[in-house]
Image (cartoon, rainbow, N blue to C red):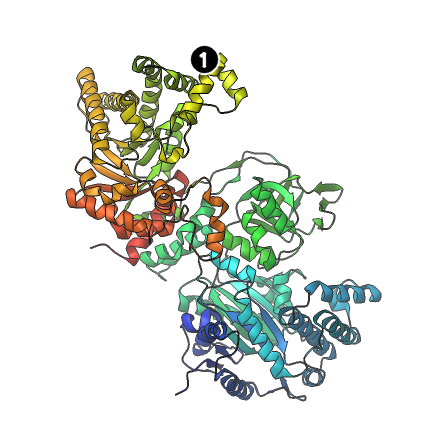
Amino acid sequence: MAKKWVYFFGNGETDGQGGDKVLFGGKGANLAEMVELGIPVPAGFTITTEACIEYYRNNEQWVEGLEKQVRENIARVEKAMGKKFGDPDNPLLLSVRSGARASMPGMMDTVLNLGLNDETVQGLIKRSGEERFGWDSYRRFIQMYGDVVMGVEHSHFETALEELKENKGVELDTELDAADLKQLVDKYKEVVKASAGKLFPEDPMEQLVGSINAVFDSWNTPRAVRYRKMNDIPDDWGTAVNVQAMVFGNMGDTSGTGVAFTRDPSTGENVFYGEYLMNAQGEDVVAGIRTPKPIKALEDDNPTVYRQLVDIYQTLEQHYKDMQDIEFTIEDGTLYMLQTRTGKRTAPAAVRIAVEMVEEGLIDKKTAVMRVEPAQLDQLLHPNIDPDESYDAIAKGLPASPGAAVGRIVFDAEEAEKWVNEGKKVVLVRNETSPEDIGGMDVAEGVLTARGGMTSHAAVVARGMGKCCVAGCGDARIDEGAKTLSFNSTVLKEGDWLTLNGTTGEVIVGQVDLIEPQLTGNFGTLMEWSNEFRQIGVRTNADTPRDSEAARDFGAEGIGLCRTEHMFFEGDRIRAVRQMILASDQEGREKALAKLLPYQRGDFVGIFRAMKDLPVTIRLLDPPLHEFLPHEDDDIHDLAGDLGVSFQELKQTVESLSEMNPMLGHRGCRLGITFPEIYAMQARAIFEAAAELTQDGETIIPEVMIPLVGVAKELQLMKDVCDKEAQAVMDEKGVKFEYRVGTMIEVPRACVCAEEIAAEAEFFSFGTNDLTQMTFGFSRDDAGRFLPGYTDMGILEKDPFQSLDQTGVGQLVEMGVDRGRKAKSDLKIGICGEHGGDPSSVDFCHRAGLDYVSCSPFRVPIARLAAAHAAIRNPRP
């Protein structure tokens, strides 16, 4: 039996494809499922994702049997709709849309009104009784087909349209009559011939084949590839193609089209939310060419259709048990559903919807936790405008995506990327965005558009990215050529500062102070539910009491990494550090270190008090000493005068400490072995702080972490230093306290020899930043120059410094865990690189059997939720 590539849906009948998003994509699977639910859907058929995959394997040619099945299913659509494809009297017109298994809004191509030519347009006019509608549909088709299939620049069509309106003395497309639009059809054909070098095709089947190929091809356009990369969508999935009978929202005042959500996608409020336009086609709503009406107004325009639409949206939400994004068309008073899919939403909306659906009995807690992607929580952790800050908004648009953004104005997406690469923060300002702007939107702090509604491209994409966005700001006059943004008499230029309030839609000239958000209410509920499921702890990387308190507020269960070297740069401490480095003997070093001791002790007291009874892991000095000294002659000269040494003496010291590869040089435990007095001072500061809290009646168990250990003997020597200081402090203070000494596993040899090292260690903590650079042989300071090329070419799936390389570095981690616990079955093991806040890395750590992950304070909630996801997907015994 020949393989089936095409599946029909319509008239209450399907080929059984409902629900299978892998083979039919989200759109195709959901269209079939709506048919099975008895919802009115125009008949059509879906070409499978497998056909797309074979198209690329077959040198961009159709797989054998596909054309035959397409023709057979056209006949089924003709029967269902009572029309004929290409018939001059009663023509069936088609739409051709993409549909991958993961939603990629605006990233791939669509063709509408397919099947129109000089003959069938007359049949459309005859059947509809609307001459203007017929020519309007035809000119739209030529423009869309010419752009998507034949590669004609969209601007060429827009120029022709604007010239016609200018000649007619009108402003709106709707003011053009049938004769005008017929003239425009001829002009558009001339545009196609001039730009594409060939005539616009009149044969409907040729049009269909070209459109299907264009959708297949759009899977690999730069914008689609970029979107997949940003959203971790595999390149080998392919897209389905949905060919569907056209229904028309532009047949007059009894017709219309709209986009809606079953709940507010920005806030999550349980209200029917969306927009529509009468006498319009779908692209008119999302393109921002006309300002749409709120969905509630449809109740006045057509109460019967509105009630039917409400019944359908409630049915769909109950069926899918999630917020839905729906598209509909009203053709001469009859409602048709064109799409339903899981709706994109902001992080606040995702959290609220998940929690409230549990309260409504639609889903359980486990489903609610899985509904919110960990990376989404970044949106909740971005700044908002300080409510105590006074400011005057110069204009107000639609609050398309919440949060706040401050940046310098840029008018071009490529320019935005350039400025950000130079270290500048930008706000992207456009009349309206298109999929080509995806790169600039990704790097910008926020987006402002003059046109478009809450479901426009800018709004939908910004919400998905977690970017602040103000859309449809009608008072904004944007001249992208002159690079100016005007509000009446106020004219802003590229580079001027602008603040956006995406929560209210306000636009503010200049910079306004922002504040960090508080995690309360529904967020707190979701985090509590996450704690019920996760099986791995979450700590934080914090070096100050302030960071420690912030992390604890975010739910951190201790500190997994306190970097002591950061403390050395504060205030007068750096002077003592430099005196220690310049000392010629141990006595001189100890004298300088004695000045640092009270500072370090005070640091640790503050951190211990902030974390109260939670564990605190403190890493002893890690970087090489040259990092604490200046390297430019002018700076060396100034420091020499400050320290009372000669310029030449200091210059020689700086040069003597320089190394060919300092990251592999005299640092970490190697410094402690050469200069044990450094680690002795730090250990004493830690234990004196612990003694002080013990005397105050508090419980604290400090964990002292020795960095860069590769040989068990290194750890043994440094542990002896710590034990000696701990006993001395307990004797001096007359108190007893517990403490632990362990090591950071960041040298590949430590993973291989973990069994020997574990004999000396009371805990392991994987330092995956260094472990990654030593495993790959990459310098993390320099790899950024070429790693983007590695990921673009598919050599590496992701930057291994951002997301743990589970294939290579991951094997070393697993080896370290297995061999370490072979020596000590109860060995506590964590990870303290920034990988601890990356969701996929957290998932790996859960599977590898680690006890905890540790990350920066503002990634703690992300790690908590990622840990819950990991446990739900792969529960431990």
Q: Quadrant of residue 250?
A: bottom right
Of residues 170 and 64, which is closer to you in this image? 64
The quadrant the N terminus occupies is bottom left
Of residues 549 and 875, which is closer to you in this image? 875
45 over 442 or under it: above or below: below
Residue 535 visible in rendering:
no
Residue type of the residue flagged with mark 1: Leu
Q: Quadrant of residue 877?
A: bottom left
Of residues 316 and 868, which is closer to you in this image? 868
* Image spot of residue 405 (x, y percent): 56, 43
- The residue that label 1 is drawn on is 643
Q: Secondary structure at mark 1?
A: helix
62 over 710 or under it: above or below: below
* Image spot of residue 605 (x, y percent): 31, 24
* Image spot of residue 785 (x, y percent): 50, 45
Q: Residue at x 72, y 67 (%)?
A: 157
Question: Would you say 160 lies left or right of 265 here?
Answer: right
Q: Residue at x 23, y 30 (%)?
A: 701
Crowding near pointer 1: few (<14 within 10 Å), some, many (20+)? Answer: some
152 over 796 or under it: above or below: below
